[in-house]
Image (cartoon, grey):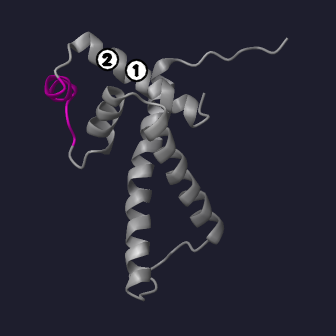
Amino acid sequence: MAAKQLIDDKTIQNEVIKELKIYKALKVKMENKKEQEEEGIDNLFPVLIKSDQIDRENILKVRQIDRALQNSLDVIEKKIIEAKYLHPTERKDIEIYLSLRLKKDKFYEKKRNAINSLATALGII
């Protein structure tokens, strides 16, 4: 009988948040690279680590997170994730749940569900 590892919600949340922050930077990197290619410029900035394998993995990571955001969350959950973790400026929870006209308890329930759905869709849990 395989032992089932129990993972607390905070660990799951930390991993998903870490991946969303990386995703945000990778998305910008991909847009910048595309723009440079369209302008016929190769490496506008110094490249310290050059690897086609890393580039392929990053492209795949962005695609899979895009898919998870689009397909594994309901509308409110997606708005919460975008506002909290993908918005250019840091936003407080109270600001987000007031703007979405949610009660505090409902907001945290939706946020927890969104984190768990993303973790499942991405294979983190």
* Rendered view: 35 above or below 66: below
Range of magenta residues: 90-100
**Seen in the image, is 124 located left or right of residue 91?**
right
Contact between labelled residues 2 and 1, with CB atoms less than 8 Å apart: yes
Mark 1 and mark 2: Cα distance apart in space = 6 Å
| Above or below 54: residue 110 | above
Give the residue at mark 2.
Answer: 108
Q: Residues within 10 Å of mark 1 (few under 14, many from 20)?
A: some
Q: Which quadrant would the N terminus be assigned to in this image?
A: top right
Of all residues, the one furthest to the bottom in this rendering is 40
Name the residue type under label 2: Tyr
Q: Residue at x 63, y 71 (%)?
A: 52
Residue 27 seen by the camera: yes
As drawn, is 99 to the left or to the right of 117? left
In this view, 77 is above or below 31 = above
Q: Position of residue 89 (x, y in %)?
A: 20, 46
Secondary structure of the residue carrying tag 2 is: helix
- Percent across and percent down for residue 103 are 20, 13
User: Does residue 45 show up?
Assistant: no
Numbered tag placed on residue 112 in the rendering: 1
Residue 123, position as x, y percentages in the image? 62, 34
Could you tell me the amino acid type at mark 1? Arg
